[in-house]
Amino acid sequence: MDAIDVMVEEHRNIERMLEVVRKVCIKIVNQEEVDYKNFYKIIDFVRNYADKHHHSKEETILFGKLSAGEGNHIGKVSVEGMLVEHDLGRLFIMNLENALKKYEEGDKDSRVDIIANSIGYADLLKRHIFKENNALYRFARKNLSKEDLEEINEKCKELEEVAGDKKLQEKYLNLLDELERSI
C-alpha cells in the first residue's frame, strides 16, 4: 500500500464533498428548497472522514516525518502551514454548525453565515488539497528516505485496516453518494 496514493484518493472524495457543499449553497442563494439537515451530514463527513480519518494520518504520521531532522526548514514550515489550515477548516465547520443551530431556532439571517462558512471551508480545502497533492506529497516522496516512506506506508496501512474493520470508508463514501444524488 502506498500511503500517499491513498491520501490523494481521499482528497478526491473530499473534493466531491466540496462540490456538494457548493451546490447546496447555490440552492440557498437561488432561494430553492434546501434540506438543511444535509448540512449535518456534510459536517459528519468532514469531521469523521476528512478530519479524523484523513487529516489524522497526515498529522500523526506523515507530518512528523516531514518536519523531523536538523536543517529541514522547508519541511517544518510546510507542515506548520498545513496544520494551520487544518485548524482553520475546523473553525469553519464549528461556525457552520453554530449557524445551523441559529437557523433552526428561527434566525433566517443565519443563512448568510451558513453560506459563508460552507464556502469558506470549501475554498480553503480546495486550495489546501492542491498544495498537498502538488507540493507537500511530492516533497515527501523526493526527500524522505525509503525507510521513512515504508514506515509511513505501514502505519497508514494499520489505520486503514482498523477503519476498514469499522466500515468507516464504506459508510462515508455511501453518505457522499447519497448527498450527490440528493442535490
Image (spheres, rainbow, N blue to C red):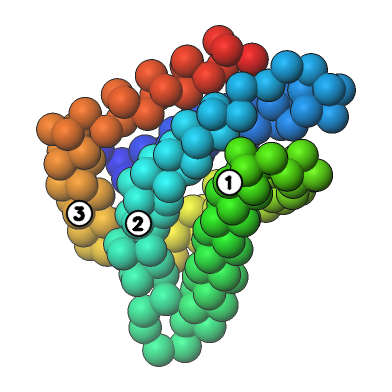
Q: Quadrant of residue 84?
A: bottom right
Which residue in the protein does label 1 denote? 101
Q: Measured from the top left, where is residue 127 in percent x and y?
A: 68, 50
Q: Residue at x 47, y 15 (%)?
A: 178
Is 129 above or below relative to 18?
A: below
- Mark 2 vs mark 1, CA separation in Å: 27 Å
Q: Residue at x 42, y 23 (%)?
A: 175
Labels 3 and 1: the sequence-earlier one: 1
Residue 31 or residue 77, whichever sits in front:
31
* Label 2 packing within 10 angstroms: few (<14), some (14-19), many (20+): some
- Could you tell me the amino acid type at mark 3? Lys
The numbered dot on residue 155 is 3
Q: Is residue 67 visible?
A: yes
Is 76 above or below relative to 158?
A: below
Which residue in the protein does label 2 denote? 56
Q: Measured from the top left, where is residue 62 in percent x and y?
A: 36, 61
- Mark 3 vs mark 2, CA separation in Å: 12 Å
Q: Secondary structure at mark 1?
A: helix
Q: Nearer the viewer, mark 3 or mark 1?
A: 1
The quarter of the picture where the N terminus appears is top left
Q: Secondary structure at mark 2?
A: helix
Residue 124 or residue 40, whichever sits in front:
40
- Could you tell me the amino acid type at mark 2? Ser
Name, please, the residue furthest toward the front.
106
6 lies left or right of 39: left
Q: Is residue 4 visible?
A: no
Q: Measured from the top left, where is residue 48 in percent x and y?
A: 37, 44
Q: Quadrant of residue 103?
A: top right
